[in-house]
Amino acid sequence: MTAVLELRGVTKSYGEREVLRGIDLIVDENKALALIGASGSGKSTMLRCIDLLEEIDDGDVLLDGEVITDPSVNPISIRRRLGLVFQQFNLFPNMTVVENVALAPRRAHREPHQEALAHARELLARFGLADREQDYPDRLSGGQQQRVAIVRALATRPRALLLDEVTSALDPELVGEVLDVVRELKYEGMTMVIATHEMGFAREVADEICFLHQGMIVERGRPEEIFGSPQRPETQRFLRRLLEGRRL
Amino acid sequence: MDGRSQRTPAELSGRAASLASDRRAARTAARRAKTRRSIAISTVSTIVVLGGLTALIVTSPGWPTVRETFFSWPAFKESFPDVLRAFWLDVRMFVIVEVIVLVLALGIALCRVTRAPALFPFKLLATVYTDIFRGIPTILVVYLIGFGVPALQLTGVPTDPVVLGCAALSLSYSAYVAEVYRAGIDSVHRSQTAAALSLGLTGGQAMRFVVLPQAVRRVLPPLLNDFISLQKDVALVSIIGPQEAFRVAQIYQGQNFNFTPLVAAAALYIAVTFPLARILDRMQARERRRREAALA
């Protein structure tokens, strides 16, 4: 099996605050890795560091065996090989749905305009968004917006997809349609890193779970191990609190 | 068992419907009465206030003299064609200056927000530029450029006061408009840039396709406001010579000791700023509706 993404001793601080404290991680091809942990445990920062939106302080990130955090590497060319989906969708409100999706293929990958549009339409249709392609994002429900954001990230045919709490900003009844899309992608073999609060979903889709606590991965394993018999007290406490929250 | 429970469901729903329609009719009538009352009140209030003001002016002791020197029909008839012709120069000047300002100010704003190290000297220049030209009164800029540049006696540099006046206005207004653009660029959330970068766009592409279109849309009202202000500030160019509307009106006034031509010129300035002001109002109303609809 080949590793698509690898993190080796990655650290990152904002001023005095250490957000990532020596992260080691491997994501193999066609695998989905779920990052769980409390808000502020470093999940989002880790994804942003992988996509080179943040500069790491120490350690290395590798994409297909190539060190991408080397200062000599052009971050733009790396970002073109990765897809990142944000919690707040971040669709471009000045463009229609189909223009949102076609922007990067056209401008970053230099696809001819018509081809980029045709491919964007095809992708939107595949995820049930064909009838919304001419709408502006503010006309869409949150669930639809997030689905468009995922399609937009897919349009550049990324090597791996990074999902940053993609359902946390949604009304509860809209979570399902977004998770269905991610399920579908998993089924198609997309390599993914998923930061999430949806434990049921993580258990179902992920091949491996990493529990992040104060910038460190304190426990990792297959879903049934982490959720069935967590070993570390931090993990046990986190899962217990989640369960209590659900019952309320 | 009480009486109500013995009614059939059909009777019940029929009763509810007629009750509801009675209520609805009463509410509609009340709403109409309220609207009629507001219209009546606003009409009376307008008549009282405007009528009072008019009466105050017309009955003032100096009014006959003022009417003669400021609102004289013969003086108006005599001067208006010339003032109007001169106003054409104002129109040409502000159209040209507006175009120059739109482009120049955008360039300055982009220099100010750039983080590219190679552009640092431009960033510095742009900052100094806006600080200086926002600080000097526009009338002084017109004066200094209008008399200073010809005094340099450089070959190839225009000495036409109209050109120099336009240059002075462009310099002064670009500083203001650059800050308007910059405020717009700053107002676009950084997550928009992050999203564009994550898709593999360069910083320049993110600015051009994502940030700027949103920024410009947001600052359109203040931008138009600056243009309204510019459309009347072209009169400042008159101090270095060009015979535009204010200047021509002033010449008439100097000859006849009658201020009517100046009032005529004022009416012309209003005539061009008024449509822009209405467009601005409508744009702001639309923007507000859009924002409220997005929040709902």
Image (cartoon, coloured by chain):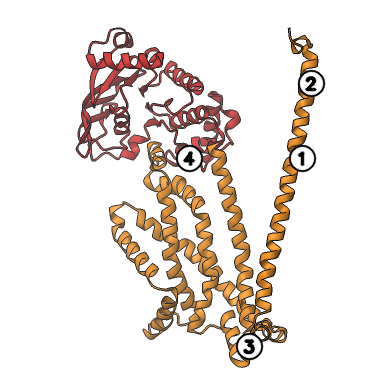
Q: Which mark is residue B29?
A: 1
Colour of chain A, in one word, is red
> Which three-letter amino acid code belongs to the residue tagged 3?
Asn
**Helix, strand or loop for disc 2:** helix
**Helix, strand or loop for disc 4:** loop
**Mark 2, other Cα within 10 Å: few <14 / some 14–19 / many ≥20:** few
Residue A5 in view here: yes
Circles 4 and 1 on the same chain: no
Circles 4 and 3 on the same chain: no
**Helix, strand or loop for disc 3:** loop
Q: From the image, which quarter does the N terminus of chain B lie in? A: top right
> Which three-letter amino acid code belongs to the residue tagged 2?
Arg
Where does label 2 land, which residue? B15
CA–CA distance between discs 1 and 2? 21 Å
Where does label 4 land, which residue? A92
Q: From the image, which quarter does the C terminus of chain B lie in? A: top right
Chain letter, colour orange in render: B
